[in-house]
Image (spheres, rainbow, N blue to C red):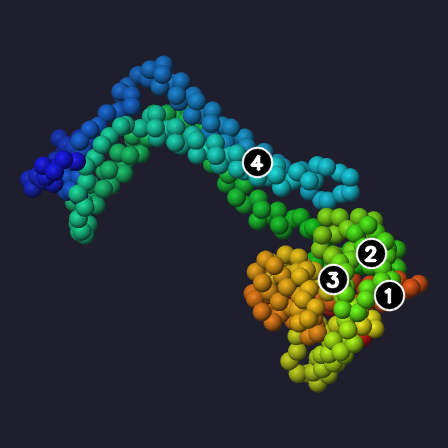
Amino acid sequence: MSSEHHAPVADPSFDVDDPRNTRFDLVREGLRRDGMEIAYYEPAFPPGRKSKVEKRIERSIALLFVLAGLFAVAFVVAYIWWPWKYEMGATASKFYTPILALTLGGSLVLLAFGIIAWAKKLLPHEVVIQDRHDGASPYDEQRLTGAAIMNIVDETGIRRRPLLKAALALPAAGLGVAAVAPLVGALIKDPNDGHPLLKTGWNPENNNGRPVRLTRQDGTPVRPEEVSPGGQMTVFPGIPGGATNKWADSPVLLIHLRQADADRLRASIAASQAALAEGRDVTRPVVDGMWQNFVAYSKICTHAGCPASLYEQQTNRLLCPCHQSQFLITEQAKPVFGPAHRKLPMLPLDVEDGFLVARSDFLEPIGPTYWERPVEINEQEATS
Ligand code: FES
């Protein structure tokens, strides 16, 4: 805009209801009243019979929309039928999430390209100079704005481009279904086979009803004397695939407490049990899962599920590196710092044939706190 530019002046005698006005007249008048002037306006293609070029562009855009629709349909199909459960040795399930991302992302990208191409190639080219001002919207301006909006709809050419209109319906429908699929799917698919959050690799069901051994990543079982006082070790359920993604919710930090720390933890558990017995308020469940001076806690942070694995021996704190939550080991792993506000579940320990085993599965849901709800487990089992 040059410095000599003056704000456009609206014509006070302009009658918006004059039937001789074209819609474009109304649009221009509306812009003028808003301090804008159409300096340059040129339709991308003249109205009327479509040229070959116009048709070719239309077909290209329609192709983008059709592909967007097919990708959206592929997302829904993959969401429902692609193998999604982890199985040892199977590779298809590994691609479940990438396939969902590829199909849904592809659909959105193609739809975006189609819309951009439509705007760049088929919409009129125009330059409008605008002066900013404040102001309410009296009747006339509402009328003019309505005309402008209808003009925009017409300029998209949607009315005279049935091919594009039909092609757009496919991604619209596909993405609509894709949007509701996760909501409906969550009601149908159950990754825990009917044992929501209370069944991990430590469940004796996975070991023919026998207690599951604590094992290292290579599958070798752990003897108590292999962990010195003050030492700790990450262990996995001693079942087939126990250290794989199949049981990603099961890693546990085994800690051999020094005598004074073990006494503190025992006192903390006893105090909670007494409070529970007297009906006083206490964080439930109270699990006495120690074996001698050994204790084991779930490594899945109760804030957002990161591995809480930085053990600070001097302070007896277990740190989660993601958002710095800290859990006090000698206080039943209750959170003492950071965003987590539920203690880490304790795995009940025992020793069989000289090896450490889990007496049972966890007695409370592991992982993020948003799963927290009234505990429905057997309180007697927890406190026994
Ligand atoms: S996931 Fe552990 S603090 Fe956030």
On the question of residue 256 being in view, the answer is: yes
Q: Position of residue 285 (x, y in %)?
A: 71, 72
The type of residue carrying mark 4 is: Leu
Mark in front: 4 vs 2: 2
Disc 1 + disc 4, Cβ < 8 Å:
no
Q: CA distance from mark 3 to mark 1?
A: 16 Å
Mark in front: 3 vs 4: 3
The type of residue carrying mark 2 is: Thr
Dividing the picture into quadrants, the one containing residue 168 is: top left
Q: CA distance from mark 3 to mark 4?
A: 36 Å
Badge 4 marks a residue whose secondary structure is helix
Q: Disc 3 marks which residue?
A: 253
Q: Position of residue 61 (x, y in %)?
A: 42, 25
Q: Disc 2 marks which residue?
A: 215
The type of residue carrying mark 3 is: Leu
> Among all residues in the image, which is located at the extreme bottom?
278
Q: CA distance from mark 1 to mark 4?
A: 50 Å
* Residue 225's disc number: 1
Dividing the picture into quadrants, the one containing residue 301 is: bottom right
Mark in front: 1 vs 4: 1
Q: Which of the two residues, 70 or 366, is positioned nearer the viewer here?
A: 366
Whichever of callouts 3 and 1 sits on the residue coming sooner in the sequence is 1
Q: Disc 4 marks which residue?
A: 102
Q: Which of the two residues, 225 or 191, is positioned nearer the viewer here?
A: 225
The type of residue carrying mark 1 is: Glu
Q: CA distance from mark 2 to mark 3?
A: 11 Å
Examine the rendered structure and indicate whether residue 354 appears above or below residue 178. Answer: below
Q: CA distance from mark 4 to mark 2?
A: 37 Å
Q: CA distance from mark 1 to mark 2?
A: 14 Å
On the question of residue 363 being in view, the answer is: no
